[in-house]
Amino acid sequence: MIKAGIIGSTGYAGGELARLLLQRDDIEILWYGSKSYVDQKYASIYQNMFQIVDDSCRDDNVEALAEIADVIFTATPQGFCASLMNEEILSKTKVIDLSADYRIKDVAVYEEWYKMEHKTPQFIKEAVYGLPEINREKIKNARLIANPGCYPTCSTLSIYPLVKEGLIDPSTIIIDAKSGTSGAGRGAKVDNLYCEVNENIKAYGIGVHRHTPEIEEQLSYGADRPVTISFTPHLVPMNRGILITSYAALTKSVSYEEVKAVYDKYYSKEYFIRVLEKDVVPQTKWVEGSNFVDVNFKIDPRTNRVIMMGAMDNLVKGAAGQAVQNMNILFGLPENKGLKLIPLFP
């Protein structure tokens, strides 16, 4: 039995973590942490947990939790995990952080984009970027996992094979991204009110979105040189889902079969990555509620570009599902245990 605690359990990602972990008979959730709802019944905050969870929310005492938990999930705002991390905690338990605190290896880049001082930069080098399809072996022995962001997960998995194989010019990458409103979190914001979002679509964070350096860093590893991208996210009026459409110049003339072979080389044995059939475009509806990422591509010989596409659920593979996938790897379990969720439809 794996004993787990969730710090930030009342946010959307924390709630999704609880939903996924509660379905398993090999996990015991010891701690539903919440800064805003201490001593309130968890099921009073998420009514879908009525008669399923009797526990009340507890404070964010990670040091106390580390004494009793095998793994701690921190689904908290940027800066929180970094502000409390110490060697004593990491010597007692595994930590899977769903924030950006340990994703970016250059602390100066983190501080520039997130506009805050990093409180524990000494742990950045140790932290493993938790994208299993690329970093599986490093994840196995990690103490601290930096769970990737939602946009970076979908973007990187859609683009990485062609960058790695040198089929595209990394300096030409443009990413058009779209996300449902749950990606903005559960906090009350005017921009996320129903009347602001419904029947509307808009770009935001243009040229300054915080996931930009994370995507650039991961693609740089694949390209083996620094990569700079153009990244524009959009908010769309749906609860869940991310759709990525990326563009890049080809480095040589290629056929459909050649590009398909590259994707199959990287993903044919990956349970959660589905390379779609020719001319079938990824859609958010076909991955909703699941840990799958659907990817595909289209060659445009007229412009000498390739269009790379990806779709996934931002709360599952983009947050909680990927965190559980990382936990499975850490504890030597089948990677898809508890995650064989068939996408919801309709």
Image (cartoon, grey):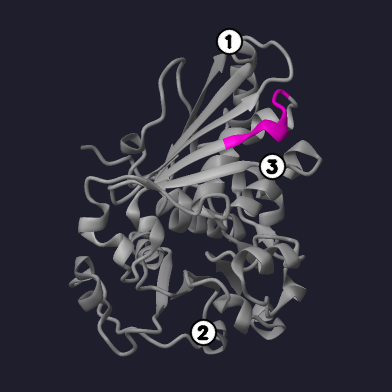
Total marks placed: 3
Q: Left of 159 or right of it: where is 187?
A: left
- At horizontal 36% and vertical 61% (from top left) the residue drawn is 16
Q: CA distance from mark 1 to mark 3?
A: 26 Å
- Residue 18: give x, y in percent of width and height: 36, 66
Pair 3/2: label in front: 3
- Residue topped by disc 2: 65
Q: Residues within 10 Å of mark 3 (few under 14, many from 20)?
A: many
Pair 1/3: label in front: 1
Q: Residues within 10 Å of mark 2 (few under 14, many from 20)?
A: many
Please say if 144 is above or below 317: below
Q: CA distance from mark 2 to mark 1?
A: 58 Å
Q: Which amino acid, mark 3? A: Leu
Residue 276 can be seen, yes or no = yes
Determine the secondary structure under disc 3. helix
Q: Which amino acid, mark 2? A: Leu
- Residue topped by disc 1: 302
First reached walking from the N terminus: tag 2 or tag 1: 2
**Residue 209's quadrant in the figure?**
bottom right
Q: What stretch of residues is rendered in magenta?
A: 167-174
